[in-house]
Amino acid sequence: MAVVRPLRKSRIVKKRTKRFIRHQSDRYVKLKPSWRKPKGIDNRVRRRFKGQYLMPKIGYGSAKATKHVCPDGFKKVLIHNVRELEVLLMQNRTFSAEVAHDVSSRKRKDIVERAQQLAIRVTNAGARLRSEENE
């Protein structure tokens, strides 16, 4: 069977790839670098002084056409059972299936098999699969 290609593969442009780091997290070990909005009345970062850390804002959001799109051109949908694959039947050029981590290897095999019949791409099709010679 031929490989399923995305309907529209446009170039994904990120406005910012660096993470926003917390003010003074480089100074104190107790402050982790994960972003927290500064709330102080005199805070330089909150007041957006030149040369300070940048704060996240809505303008850094992704373009609507490429939002939630993986590098392969598909959007991911989490699948727990074979019946949920039927939802992607008409959308197989836009969405790809990703089998949830709590699905057993036996059910996983059924899902991957049914996805091939419906021409749906599965991102983690090789997970928890053992070859015949090992069994």
Image (tube, helix red, strand yellow):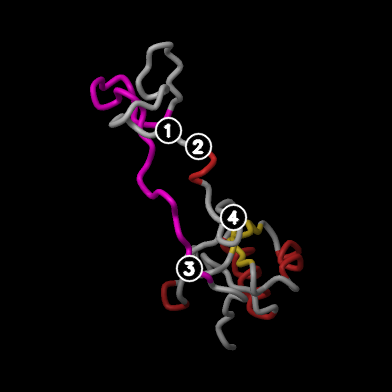
Q: Which amino acid does label 4 sit on?
A: Ala
Disc 3 secondary structure class: loop
Q: Is residue 11 magenta?
A: yes
Measured along the vertical axis of the image, is residue 14 above or below residue 110?
above
Disc 2 secondary structure class: loop
Task: Decide: few, some or many residues near mark 1? Use Cα within 10 Å; few <14, some 14-19, many ≥20.
Answer: some
Front residue (pair 24, 131): 24
Asked whether disc 4 touches disc 2, contact meaning CB atoms under 8 Å apart, the reply is no
Q: Earlier in the sequence, mark 1 or mark 3?
A: 3
Residue 57 is left or right of residue 17, and the answer is: right
Task: Decide: few, some or many residues near mark 2? Use Cα within 10 Å; few <14, some 14-19, many ≥20.
Answer: few
Disc 1 secondary structure class: loop
Front residue (pair 11, 132): 11
Measured along the vertical axis of the image, is residue 103 above or below residue 48?
below
Asked whether disc 2 touches disc 3, contact meaning CB atoms under 8 Å apart, the reply is no
**What segment carries the magenta color?**
10-35
Tell me the number on the disc at residue 100.
Answer: 4
Q: What residue type is labelled 3?
A: Arg
Q: Which residue lies furthest to the front in this view?
A: 50
Residue 125 is left or right of residue 47, and the answer is: right
